[in-house]
Image (cartoon, coloured by chain):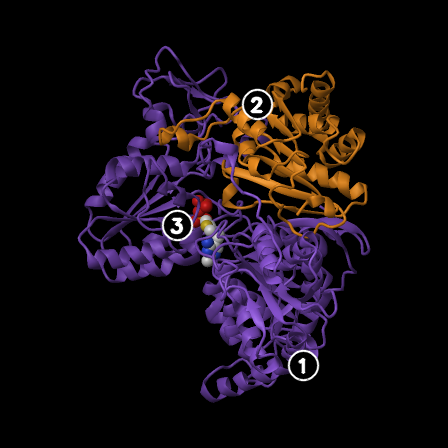
Chain colours: A purple, B orange
Amino acid sequence: MGLLSEPGKLEVLLGNEAIARGAIEAGLDVAAAYPGTPSTEIGEALSAAAREVGFHFEWAANEKVATEVAAAAAWSGLRSMAFMKHVGVNVAADAVFTLAYAGVVGGMVFVSADDPHAHSSQNEQDNRLLLRAINLPTVEPADPQEAKDFTRSAFDLSEEYGLPFALRTTTRVSHVRAPVVLGPIRERRGKGRFSPDPPRRYVQVGRLARAHHRELLEKLSRIREEVAEGGEFLRVEGQPGAELGIMTSGVSYNYVWEAVRRLGVEAQIMKLGMTNPLPEGRISDFLREVDTLLVVEELEPVLEADAARLAKEANPDLRIVGKFSGHLPRVGELDPVSVTAAVAEAAGVEFSPPSRGTGAGIDLPPRPPVMCPACPHRATGFALKRVAGRAAFMNDIGCYALLFQKPFELADVTHAMGSSVGFANGLSVATDRQVVALIGDSTFFHAGIPALINAIHHGRKFLLVVMDNRTTAMTGHQPHPGTDLDALGREAFPLDIERVVRGLGVENVWVVDPYDFEETQKAIKEAMGRDGVSVIISRRECALLTVGRLRREGKKIVPYRVDPDRCTHCLVCVKTYACPAFVDTGEKVRIDPAVCFGCGSCVDVCPFQAIVPQEGSLDWRRDGYGV
Amino acid sequence: MGSDELDEFNIIVAGVGGQGILFTSRVITAAALEAGMRFVQSEVHGLAQRYGSIHTEIRLGRDVRSPLIMPGTLDLLIALEPIEGARFAGYMSGKTSAIVNTYMIPPISAFVEGRKIPELEEILEAIRSAGPGRLVPIPATELAAEAGDPVTTNVVVLGAAAAMGALPFDEGDVRAALGRVTPERYLEVNLRAFDLGRDFVLKGAGR
Ligand SMILES: Cc1ncc(C[n+]2csc(CCOP(=O)(O)OP(=O)(O)O)c2C)c(N)n1
């Protein structure tokens, strides 16, 4: 990866890698984050570059801690960055709202990576609204080049105004790859100095908080005048004098640019790179010049509401086309079809959207993501379904959330990180139903512990199963407080979940290998009978890690096979274990050798002992792999 | 409306998570970079990679800004699995070339839910009826095994696409790009896979 190539070079970068490069160009000293799609690759890029460049990067326990790490560095005069997915900002919010009052000394950039369409998320919240409520100046790049350039500028401006700057992306900026021209890398500062000036700068209570609030608003109004109106992030292009004006920002600009050309319409386009504070003077001038305004933005009608407000003064007769008029959706992401249709509508030209229909007339089976072959969560789910299937299942956020699918259906709820345990508290108050909470190891450390403490303190009764696969798997295997290496591969102290829960006062604790069906089912049965909070730690490393290790050790992955003479086509394997390597041929079950990892965990699932090893197959449990 | 007004060349690489879709796309953009072409590519990260449907959209040309392709303007479909290819039938037109690996990977969820899985012939017919200018089915997974590793299925398909002249680069430029982005220890098997895909097309099996 050419992340550290020399200035002037053209490198192909993902939007997220471009943000990392922008930060490095700005002289980044300290970065911290908690992983989450679509922000994670910023951290992957920083992890890879940190040692060579010399800055600090850590995967923190959660987004709030990450923000506090970065803020303290910025207070010490260093340049720092915290980044997270949109819902991560909810976790960090308590720290960031007040950080805006406190301000910073060194430049600090706070990245919110939003996910319109909820491609990999539990909601599609629009953090432009949240960032406005926090009062952070916000820039929004449209592509990887801008992602890099805006990040670097945001560091300089943050330092100039003593206020963290937010960089907001969406999935189609974060996960777009394109050539980027690199800039020079500024020298880092290394160690900082913490000496608050004035001494109560970072103390926020009553009178002090009010004074700092006032200062914050003054900073914002200066930023509006000097930066937003100044035009560094603003571009007006297209046909001067055209009656149609289009206001847009971020990735939506790209759809607009092409739609205008594809339709051959005349339009003036105002592209806003800074969306808080807004260049209200420049926008008002723009509104005065046009008869129709189309506002193209994803999710909430944020800019559109501002345009409507400013138009009252600037151009009361203006026709505004957008979300309020029903021409663009508030749900899901925009795309070439929806934007071209909106431009056509606003311009009064014809556009018949091509059909997006798939598979001309045949019924294609959907292919949702599923748990990998050999996934330990499948084995835990198999045991839970057998002996606790009637309980209410509070699932959480991680790969194990896929247990909501058939045949497991072990999710009455999946909600937000750590919520499984919080909801289990509430259900055990409100009902007499058996409750099982499922949580991953990374999620346990991130937000599960306070809810567990609450349950112990109040004597609640439920079973908590910690699906400890020794990593943050869903986002691509980042370390967490329970792993023995940190983001840069240095040794770190691994917190032991068993000791943590025992230390909190839980007495009913079991640690099981989920591949051991008998032991796991026995533990579940016992736990369900106990009073108070019981905890089962179902521990086996993520199968992708095990397979990677076996490959590195030069061990051959030899798949299992189904003995057709013994297979009765009862489909118990498919209908209760559902490994993606199983293929139902209509007469027999077959194991696809290209998919099977050769773990051997499914052998005991078959009532007819038809699943058998081949010459050289391992048995991960017997041979001690993955535990 | 018609894409001939814009200078764009639109490619979709579709398949199942784990089939090397990102790698295939990287070879194509590496060739584009070398040719001094403008491009944008949108890709999928996160949960969707776990054995689900995955695709990338690659757009080459002077007028490309949008990371997503307008349906009806697809120039090339590279399908590493037939069901995944058929999902993009609505993106095709008479100018589309489609190259489709014939090795089916039926989704486990269909078996669990007892859903019918269409036959390969039905799927190819569905793609054909969407009216691509050219459709080349290729037994790429079998050829990849012949090359030495079924994991090189994607490279076989890429070699075939290059030999069809379905990419806006010479076959040699694509092969050179493959050489640049492949890690040393996989170079030999990858080049072998590429050549098997190329030969499949050149021998006329793909007509
Ligand atoms: C507040 C918040 N931060 C980050 C994420 C992104 N995210 C989803 S699941 C997950 C971690 C899952 O790790 P773990 O609980 O260990 O389960 P695994 O995927 O390893 O099974 C993360 C970081 C999120 N959804 N919400």
| Crowdedness near tag 1: few (<14), some (14–19) or many (≥20) residues, C-alpha within 10 Å | some
Q: Is residue B42 left or right of residue A451?
A: right
Q: Is any atom of residue A59 visible in this view?
A: yes
State the SS at label 1.
Answer: helix
- The amino acid pointed to by label 2 is Thr
Question: How far from the left and from the top, in percent, is residue B25?
Answer: 67, 38
Which of the 4 quarters of the picture holds residue B129? top right
Q: Is residue A79 something one can see in this rendering?
A: no
Q: Position of residue B124 (x, y in %)?
A: 55, 25
Residues flagged by tags 1 and 2 on a common chain: no
**What distance separates the C-alpha of mark 2 from that of mark 3?**
47 Å
Mark on residue B102?
2
Specify the subunit that label 3 lies on: A
Q: Amino acid at mark 1?
A: Glu
Neighbour class for label 3 at 10 Å: few (<14), some, many (≥20)?
some
**x and y percentages locating residue B72 in the rendered image:** 62, 41
Quarter of the figure with residue A378: top left
* Circle 3: element type: helix
Quarter of the picture containing the C terminus of chain A is: top left
Q: Residue at x 59, y 25 (%)?
A: B101
Distance between the alpha carbons at the discs numbered 1 and 2: 61 Å
Residue hosting label 1: A225
